[in-house]
Image (cartoon, rainbow, N blue to C red):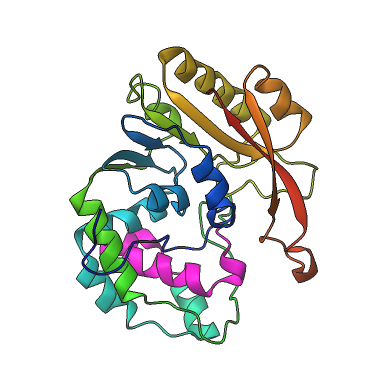
Amino acid sequence: MLFTVVKPKPFVKWAGGKRQIINILMENIPNKFGKYIEPFVGGGALLFELLPKKAIINDINGELINLYRVIKDSPEELIESLKKHKNEKEYYYRLRAISPYDLTPVERASRFLYLNKTCFNGLYRENSKGEFNVPFGRYKNPKILDIENIKAVSEYLNSANIEIYDFDYKEIIPEMAEPGDFVYLDPPYQPVSKTSSFTKYTKYDFTEKDQRELADVFKELDRKGCYVMLSNSDTNIIRKLYTGFNIIEIQTNRPINSKANKRKASAVELLIKNY
């Protein structure tokens, strides 16, 4: 696929993003598949590496999905809005305090992207009321506006057949998945301890019960004839849930941590496939 600007790349920083292991993911995708489905799209690292011609992407984070839609439909308006932002602490907290529901879709997208680029460590977190509550990040020169990439992502989302949703993943699959489709599941990870893993991206936590339900969906997709690949942490629970499938150990780093000296600590994660 050729682009008139540049090849699109992820436009948000995202906890659990897969850019650092994208080569491993690409080595493990099916040789041939129908449409691509990613129910926990997040920053979309694999989406923008694969650039499928037909895909369904979804995330329960409505602010994130609004940004995808605005980049697709209103890139120039978003660019103009982003030009207005200031990398200042007082301005950050003033904008963070505004309810996104009082804004237009473009203003919401602009606010979300600005907060993502200037908040502490690019972390997205909501309190129990669904309010973004990450502190100011104190970056000297964050790249709030990347005109070339916004245009490239917009071009891709419009040139390919990409359906965009913000539902619970169980409303997207397996109903929309057909035999031969490739489904990549990148859910909030199962905690490796009570304090070490970050799973609360929205006001809805992803519990052990959710992990078991996801494993049931994985198996249903397998029975349906889909190619399914899943990323998760290396825990006894996850290994037990996916017994009988192809489990691959991969070395990775954990960039989201409150202590800087621990952000590059090596860890083992699991890549699980049914093929």
On the question of residue 104 being in view, the answer is: no
On the question of residue 10 being in view, the answer is: yes
Q: Quadrant of residue 245?
A: top right
Q: Is residue 42 above or below residue 238?
A: below
Q: Is residue 131 above or below residue 29?
A: below
- The residue lying at 61 percent from left, 71 percent from top is 120
Q: Is residue 111 above or below residue 196?
A: below
Q: Is residue 67 magenta?
A: no
Give the main secondary structure of the magenta stretch.
helix
Name the foreground residue: 133 vs 217: 217
Q: Quadrant of residue 273?
A: top right
Q: Residue 36: x percent and y percent?
A: 36, 36
In this rendering, the count of numbered labels is 0
- The residue lying at 45 percent from left, 48 percent from top is 46
Left or right: where does residue 153 sit relative to residue 111?
left
- The residue lying at 25 percent from left, 60 percent from top is 154
Q: Residue 38: x percent and y percent?
A: 42, 39
Q: Residue 253: x percent and y percent?
A: 69, 56
Left or right: where does residue 275 sit relative to residue 145?
right
Instruction: Please provide the residue range marked out in magenta.
Output: 97-124
Q: Residue 226: x percent and y percent?
A: 42, 22
Residue at the top extreme of this rendering: 223
Q: Is residue 118 magenta?
A: yes
